[in-house]
Image: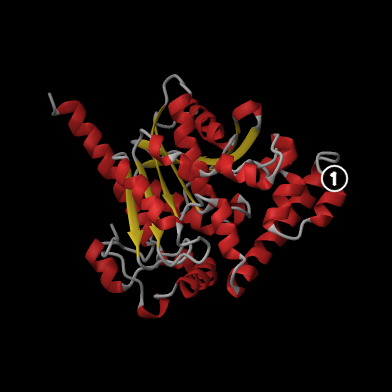
């Protein structure tokens, strides 16, 4: 089950080292690592679930063969998400139409709407509605969903929503996720159990609070400023800002409701999960459950790596040569290769299997 073909440089064979290095080095140098240029994005506003406006970027290459729809993790906004921009460049260069978007409560979507994030409960439908809007704007009808970290959890909810909702002229073929959050309760308890984890949790909390103040300024009355002041942890942010509006009586109840691990046994569309053993964000006790879920559902392909950190997976020169990659971004390369393999399977099934 462990993918032995991924190997990082020797000094990055540690989850914390990889996470810090990928974040700091990648943010500064990522553009110099890829030969692919920026797609000619158009700024668009999609109509999401419950008619929530969703801000995004859209680019369609000539003779596009399919569409990738993707978003990012727990904090930030579309303009500063370099790892997502990297996917956009690579996908566009390979003939995909590309849609990148600010999810609920983030970036320009937060400017357009006071709708708060729900960790997938409503964002799943947003993915489906964005796909419908993108196809109406000229994107190919076959759509693939992609995301990382908490955005990976949203993708899993998007795959589920696509199985429950029917949209004419749109095929959501499946999805791919990198280091997805799939059990908030266990992972949050793990994160605050050791020093570096507590540092990460504190930084995320600060950014969540900043996002909340921005929403309060843009949409007065939606959030109680006293509640925003009380935010001093990720758990507390959900308690003060999220659960009441979603109808939950406790944070624990909310986390159980959005737990993407519970979705995996019932997904019926091709799903790639790239997950690593040394991810410093997530409780290692999740891994046996993830492996069991993947083993029981043939639509799930699990790439479990020994190294990689959280949304890192920078590959060594030897690893790049082995995979014939033209850059060190192993995980995105595997995502795009996997999607192409799935499309080849679909083509063979349609035209060659009787």
Helix, strand or loop at label 1? It is loop
Question: Residue 348: where, in percent of width, then height?
Answer: 18, 33
Horizontal side of residue 275 vs 114, given as left or right: left
**Residue at the spot of label 1:** 224
Query: Which residue is rendered at x = 59% and y = 60% of the image?
Result: 189
Examine the rendering and report whether any part of residue 155 can be seen: yes
Q: Quadrant of the N terminus?
A: bottom left
Question: Residue 134: where, in percent of width, then height?
Answer: 49, 31
Question: Residue 329: where, in percent of width, then height?
Answer: 39, 62
Horizontal side of residue 50 vs 179, given as left or right: right
State the residue lying farthest toward the bottom.
Answer: 11
Examine the rendering and report whether any part of residue 72 can be seen: no
Q: Quadrant of the C terminus?
A: top left
Specify the color scheme.
secondary structure
The residue carrying pointer 1 sits among few (fewer than 14), some (14 to 19) or many (20 or more) residues within 10 Å by Cα, namely some
Counting labels gives 1
Front-lying residue, 99 or 307 = 307
Query: Which residue is rendered at x = 53% and y = 63% of the image?
Result: 281
Front-lying residue, 1 or 35 = 1
Query: Which residue is rendered at x = 39% and y = 35% of the image?
Result: 267
Front-lying residue, 212 or 92 = 212
Query: Which residue is rendered at x = 28% and y = 44% of the image?
Result: 340
Question: Residue 313: where, in percent of width, then height?
Answer: 40, 65
Residue 256 against residue 353 in the figure, above or below: below
Horizontal side of residue 144 vs 27, given as left or right: left
Residue 334 against residue 166 in the figure, above or below: below
């Amino acid at each position: 089950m462990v993918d032995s073909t991924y190997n990082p440089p020797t000094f990055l064979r540690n989850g914390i080292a990889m996470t810090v290095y990928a974040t700091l080095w990648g943010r500064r140098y990522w553009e110099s690592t890829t030969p692919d240029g920026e797609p000619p994005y158009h700024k668009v506003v999609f109509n999401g679930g419950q008619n929530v406006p969703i801000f995004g970027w859209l680019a369609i290459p000539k003779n596009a063969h399919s569409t990738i729809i993707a978003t990012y993790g727990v904090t930030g906004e579309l303009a500063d998400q370099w790892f997502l921009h990297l996917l956009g460049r690579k996908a566009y260069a390979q003939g995909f139409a590309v849609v990148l978007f600010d999810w609920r409560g983030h970036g320009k979507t937060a400017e357009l709407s006071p709708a708060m994030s729900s960790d997938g409960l409503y964002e799943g439908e947003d993915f489906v509605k964005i796909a419908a809007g993108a196809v109406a704007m000229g994107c190919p009808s076959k759509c693939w969903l992609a995301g990382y970290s908490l955005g990976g959890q949203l993708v899993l909810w998007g795959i589920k929503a696509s199985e429950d909702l029917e949209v004419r002229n749109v095929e959501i073929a499946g999805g791919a996720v990198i280091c997805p959050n799939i059990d908030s309760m266990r992972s949050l308890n793990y994160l605050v159990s050791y020093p570096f984890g507590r540092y990460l949790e504190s930084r995320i909390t600060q950014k969540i609070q900043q996002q909340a103040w921005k929403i309060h300024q843009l949409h007065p009355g939606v959030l109680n400023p006293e509640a925003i002041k009380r935010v001093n942890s990720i758990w507390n942010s959900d308690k003060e800002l999220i659960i009441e509006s979603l109808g939950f009586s406790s944070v624990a109840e909310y986390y159980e409701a959005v737990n993407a691990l519970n979705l995996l046994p019932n997904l019926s569309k091709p799903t790639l999960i790239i997950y690593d053993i040394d991810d410093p964000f997530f409780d290692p006790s999740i891994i046996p459950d993830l492996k069991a879920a993947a083993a029981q559902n043939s639509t799930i392909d699990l790439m479990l790596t020994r190294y990689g950190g959280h949304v890192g997976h920078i590959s060594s020169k030897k690893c790049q040569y082995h995979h014939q990659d033209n850059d060190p971004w192993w995980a995105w390369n595997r995502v795009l290769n996997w999607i192409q393999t799935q499309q080849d399977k679909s083509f063979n099934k349609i035209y060659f299997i009787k």
